[in-house]
Image (tube, rainbow, N blue to C red):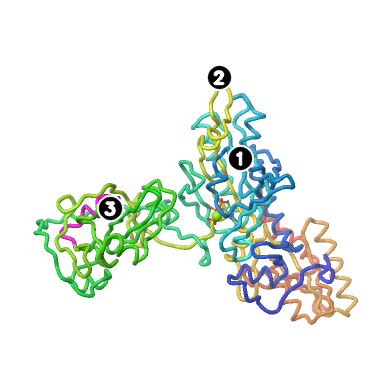
Amino acid sequence: MKMSQLFSPTLRETPADAEIISHQYMLRAGFIRKVAAGIYTYLPLGYRVIRKIEQIVREEMNKKGAQELLMPALQPAELWHESGRWDIYGKELMRLRDRHERDFCLGPTHEEVITDLVKREVNSYRQLPLLLYQIQTKYRDEIRPRFGLMRGREFIMKDLYSFDRDKEGLDESYKKMYDAYCRIFERCGLEYRSVEADSGAIGGSSSHEFMVIADSGESVIAYCENCDYAANVEKATFAMKVENSKSVLQDLIKVETPGVRTVAELEQFFNLAAKQILKTLIYETEKGFVAVVLRGDRNVNEVKLQNVLDSKYVNLVNEDRVKELIGCEVGSIGPVNLQEEIILVADREVPYVLNAICGANETNRHYQNVNYGRDFEANIIEDIALVEAGDPCPKCQGPLHITRGIEVGHIFKLGTKYSAALEATFLDEDGQARYYEMGCYGIGIGRTAAAAIEQNHDEHGIIWPVSIAPYHVVIIQVHDKEEKQKEICEELYNQLTDNGIEVVYDDRKERVGVKFKDADLIGFPLRIVVGPKTINDGTVEVKIRKTGEQLVLPLTDVNSWVNNYITSFLGK
Ligand code: ATP
Ligand code: MG
């Protein structure tokens, strides 16, 4: 490809609405253009990256015996009524009507369509396991589409669905996909971690997320450096340190605490550490009001709370409502003598806090020497705390670290959730009808491209991992009027291209400085410069984008050197 003909409109300025580096560089280097919020055109360079990631995904899926098909984006509401998701999916589901006033949606995911297909077309255990996937455009009306391809409203996803006869089969399919995902992200040249994840609204029993480590990531993960424990903080737990206190239980007393509201203020007032204070928060759920009590140095993990309560939502109640409900200021709520109709959830550490401080449910009053079991009891005692850096690892007690990541892939064991809802059965060896044990496995293709940039860039532009770079090499001609330079460039271009190397020849009538800038911005892994030295002593300069290393090679060696370098990254 000649740069003069390449359709890659670059921008000198960073567009104002692009907050993160991948979004900025994708716009500036001419990879994507915005059509509407969260909706983009992939320009030729961007689309080449997308297709490369898709191809890696496809190869690894096929290696595991999966088969590719393509389902429609447009899906009839009936299927979504059958699964029950038409009513619960909410506003993220893009809904529309046809000319006959029938309801449809644009698929955000395809459990319904695939389960219905398999239900109709498969009937015997002999046809299992079945692994079916597609690489297809998804639609989700995200509340906050942002960060370019990272969180779009229209985006490309690989989604695979596994159908097995029993739980052991599902375990095997899950393992296959887990391994394939590791291979995929390795081949894409990304630093990633697989983490235990909350199964969320899709439901199911087990799930892992694949996270590309990056500061701009929207997910927070906890991991142990001593062992392999890693989990999304939504799910992460930690070993509980029970201090064997010899304290005797003191008598409960009520104390005037004028103007003392926050944990920090209580610490000062009583001269005690935050872990000696119990704080109480009021949530509203569809099951009624819930009071959550936990140590003053802890924060509520709302995902855990929602799971413990098995509720559809948990909303923190605002100050005015708290006053109406409990009759005191937020800072004075406590678990002792709380109204009976409020469900009391205590974090698992709470029973071990002896002679604690807590609110007395009267403004400006607190209890001192509160003890679980003697002064109050909870309806539920569970782990509902957010993990903090330094908490002990639940597997090995080593200190946990917290870092940010971008979720590029997600695998779930669904069990029989959808097969039961859609009555999808097969006949087992003994002629019994059974529900399929299902799994679903997604990879965001565009998000993976964006994550690769978040992890691989510098102040000059993108540094593409070779395996997903739009082109491998750019050849830069220093003087555009020099016929001899042009001849060498063209010859080199032809030689490399014949070897399967993907080359852009920058033949533009531009200053060489401009060409260098664009080459760095676009992020070609290798840059070859053909200039006066090439004519004089037969050498070219090769620069490795990733390391900044510059080599001077005899013209006769360039072809094989480049070939070796590039193919060393393309191992399958
Ligand atoms: P998130 O929590 O980021 O919204 P999700 O849990 O909704 O993600 P899944 O339903 O598991 O995502 O989808 C599978 C994969 O699809 C994700 O791991 C991610 O890579 C990608 N993905 C999900 N939503 C988007 C989006 N709005 N834009 C781009 N990619 C997305
Ligand atoms: Mg989502």
Instruction: Name the residue that disc number 2 marks.
Output: 429
Residue 328 appears in which quarter of the rendering? bottom left
Magenta range: 340-356
Q: Amino acid at mark 3?
A: Ala
Instruction: Name the residue that disc number 3 marks.
Output: 346
- Is residue 367 left or right of 105 when viewed as pictured? left
Image x and y of residue 51, in percent: 72, 54
Identify the element where label 2 is drawn. loop
Q: Is residue 514 above or below residue 127?
A: below
Residues at badges 1 and 2 in contact (C-beta under 8 Å)? no
Q: Amino acid at mark 1?
A: Glu
Image x and y of residue 452, in percent: 61, 62
Res. 276 visible in picture: no
Instruction: Write the residue at 80% across / 66% down.
Output: 556
Q: CA distance from mark 1 to mark 2?
A: 26 Å
Res. 119 visible in picture: yes
Mark 1 crowdedness (10 Å alpha carbons): few <14, some 14-19, many ≥20: many
Instruction: Write the residue at 61% across / 36% down.
Output: 115
Q: Earlier in the sequence, mark 1 or mark 3?
A: 1
Q: Residue furthest right?
A: 483
Residue 112, numbered circle: 1
Identify the element where label 1 is drawn. helix
Depth check, front residue: 457 or 432: 432
Instruction: Write the residue at 52% across / 45% down.
Output: 202
Q: Quadrant of ligand 2?
A: bottom right
